[in-house]
Image (cartoon, rainbow, N blue to C red):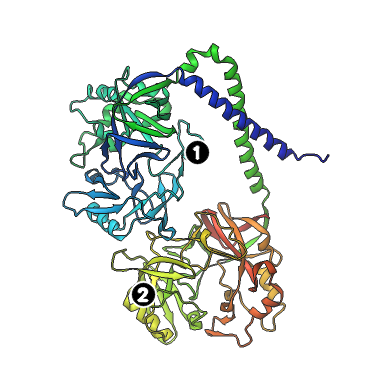
Amino acid sequence: MSEIPQEAVIFATLVGGAVVKMLFGAVTRKNRRRKMVKVGTVSELNCYPIKSCRGISVQEGMCTRLGLKVGKAADRHWMVVRSNGDFVTQRQFSRMALIQTAIEGNELIVDAPDMPTLKLPLNPITDRWHVMICRVWDLRTEGMDCGDDAAYWFSTFLKVEGVRMVYSAPDIDHRDLTKVPKPMGNFTVPGDQAAFSDFSAYFVLTEESLAALNENLAEKVTMERFRPNIVITGSPAAFDEDDWGEVEIEESAILRMLDRGSRCVITTINPDTGEKDPNSQPLETLKAMRCFPEYGSSPLFGVNATVETEGKVRVGDAVYAFMKSYIHTKMPEFSTEFTVLAALVAVTVAKFAFAAMTKNNRRNNMVKVGTVTQLNYYPVKSCRGITVNSGLGSPLGLKVENAVDRHWVVVRSNGDFITQRQFSKMALIQTEVRGNDLVLNAPGITPIKVPLSLPVTNGNVVNCRVWENRLKAVDCGKEAGLWLSTFLQEPGLRLLWAAPSLPRVDISKTKKPWGNPALPGDQAAFTDFSAYLMISEGSLCDLNGRLKQPVSMNRFRPNIVIAGCPAFDENNWSEVRIGDKAIFRILDPCDRCLLTTVIPEKGERDAASEPLNTLKSYRCFPNYGTSPLFGANATIDVEGVVKVGDPVYALRK
């Protein structure tokens, strides 16, 4: 019998430990629930469909894993974001407190003073082309853009340009709460998720806690200041909720309490006026009453919770709780189980340590493969690029100043993209960034300036198509379109810009005959596939050794050129680190087309169709169809600045 690898033994041990842990947990929970005591009654249920807007008080709802669900609307499943995807709340715009929400049939109704009513569908069909990357605190997540009408409504009311409304659709990524950094420790477990809430999917508060606070305030405040989902009355004492470990509501829904909720400036906003309290109350009083050294400088009020067992809850339901203190006061009864639990905790720690060690070992196994000798970015798809000494490796492409690789595209009047494949003269269009403008220049025509950033309005957002991907972009105006039509001698052309607030291409959805190695969340603007193309100088040298007339690297339009490695070594890498920080994930070899035959200095195709024909003679592989392979498509896992001269380290496949 062959020896089982050590890694397999460790893995089997950890899996066995995890199974035992789950079985033990189930038995322990059953024993604990026998010790649950009644702690009160549900007196309020609140659902806040739009993060940081006014909620809806209801008599009943469904406790789901992603939040309280009322009809087809779930708690904090809509969110207002800036054009870059960053979330906004009452912290920045206290007027959001005046935005009212209601549910009517299949629509979410949004109202605010002096604004027309906005209606949003409660269950829109997920359109991946409208899904954008958003950020809630330190975690990135996905949200589907709700359209220009919603964006205009919120921009108008909040008096700020560029905000969008996004929706957390059921079939897009949700936030993994175990990844939320918390100074006092994160007590979630794998599988705990939320849509757009600050942390957990539920917030629980007792009326007794509010009463204790109001006793210390000159002006009493309402429960609405604290935006709880579940309010409980009849608890034995104020802040009793801090001591609950699990809560069962009327033998239906079971919630697991995570930690105490730290409070912020939002508590000072009067929900009736949308203005902050001049004395910063009740926050200042909470700081005097409810600050604890181990939790930092923010006061604690209420409890974050997640759902262990889904179920319907109603106002008036009895609430039973298992006390955290039970495990300490009844220690003799659990001494054996506690020992087992401690052992299983150790196994779990070992499991995570093993995973971290494996990842670190993989990164530590990276070897130096070369040095960066060129960095190129191509602001306008299929036009001449710009060679630079440094740039930011961003998720959507190499970024230099305020311009990002292939964030502009030329399209026909029907929105279909064009490239040098149809118009080889595009190779003569030079691009340059000057201040806040992108300058286009070409032989025999006056240069034109295009702003690097344009407002996103109902009037200038148009549909376009890059291969099979349909997406929206901002039209850069008639002058730019006329300039391109004049130079390329093709009527009806337009120049479009990939505004940050508009949906991106999810490249994991791109169909590839040999399989698509991209992951959900890998995105691009107007590239043919991935956001980056890497080529080694060794590969070009090998090709030129077979050509009668050598060609330059600009025939292949790479972003990152690497020297010091063998020819085609880039196809053997799985991860690449450049410099100290930026880490790229290699996807697949790049299949080449007739665009490589266009001579950049002339804007004409090579009469002998070189170097494409030579590439076809030795760089075609059965698994990849009839197109030759040259270079490697890549995406970025860790953002970072890259520079010419940076060392390049790779993890081999």
Tag 1, which secondary structure? loop
Residue 30 appears in the rendering = yes
Which residue shows up at 55% across the image and 60% down it?
643
* 436 relative to 424 in the view: left or right: left
Which residue shows up at 31% across the image and 31% down it?
314
Depth check: give the residue in front, 171 or 459: 171
Residue 130 vertical placement versus 212 (above, below): below
Q: Quadrant of residue 36?
A: top left
Q: CA distance from mark 1 to mark 2?
A: 50 Å
Depth check: give the residue in front, 246 or 309: 309
Residue 443 vertical placement versus 148 (above, below): below
Residue 297 appears in the rendering = no
Q: Which mark is residue 191?
A: 1
Q: Position of residue 560 (x, y in %)?
A: 57, 65
Q: Residues within 10 Å of mark 2 (few under 14, many from 20)?
A: some
User: Sequence-wise, which precedes: disc 1 or disc 2?
Assistant: 1
- Name the image quarter holding the N terminus: top right
Depth check: give the residue in front, 227 or 393: 227
Q: Position of residue 417 (x, y in %)?
A: 45, 74
Say which residue label 2 marks: 449
Depth check: give the residue in front, 292 or 50: 50
Which residue shows up at 72% across the image and 78% down it?
546
Which residue shows up at 50% across the image and 67% down it?
527
Q: Residues within 10 Å of mark 1 (few under 14, many from 20)?
A: few
Q: Position of residue 66 (x, y in %)?
A: 41, 40
**Tag 1: amino acid:** Gly
**Tag 2: amino acid:** Lys
